[in-house]
Image: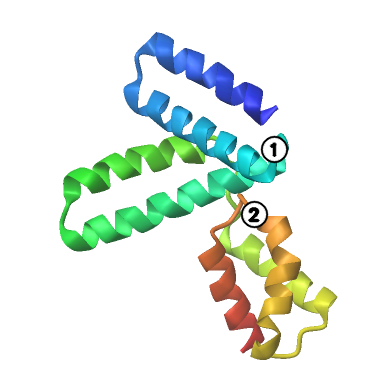
Amino acid sequence: MLRDRLNDEMKQAMKARDEIRLSVIRLIRSSVKNREIELRHELADGEITEVLSTLVKQRRESIRMFGEAGRTDLVEKEEKELAVLLTFLPQQLSREEVEALVVQAIADSGAQGPKDMGKVMKAIMPHVTGRADGSLVSVVVKEKLA
């Protein structure tokens, strides 16, 4: 389903001569293909979402690094790419929604304190992958376990 959407969006970007959108979609497709070669099977939508999440994380890190270096031209380019990438991910969770999921994961896993953070992260990540930034989830888990 997501693979078909990528193909359709690529055709539309070609027709509209939208170079940024087209290059991002090509990047997504090549990243998915590389991951398929690595795993030796065709990726399902959930696995494609994981690839997209990785690309979003890379863009956010690049934006931060370029911003620190004062490279506003590259920050602008990365932000445009990030905006396109986010259109392919499911609706992002708010902080309150993440907190509710973390509380549920803590209860389900029986975590007692900060030493159980790995257990909670393992329980919650399948539910938030592609819908929330991992660093936000990590911060919320630390707050709730403290």
The residue identified by callout 1 is 43
Q: Is residue 30 left or right of residue 69?
A: right
Q: Which residue is drawn at 53% across and 66% down?
A: 136
SS for dot 2: loop
Left or right for 18, reference 27 = left
Residue at disc 1, secondary structure: loop
x and y percentages locating residue 28 in the rendered image: 50, 35
Residue 22 place in picture, x, y as percent: 41, 24
Report the mark closest to the observer, 2 or 1.
1
4 is higher (above) or lower (below) than 125 = above
Which residue type carries mark 2? Thr
Q: Earlier in the sequence, mark 2 or mark 1?
A: 1
State how many labels appear: 2
Against 44, is 8 above or below?
A: above
Which numbered tag is attached to residue 129? 2
**In the displayed structure, would residue 108 be above or below residue 38?**
below
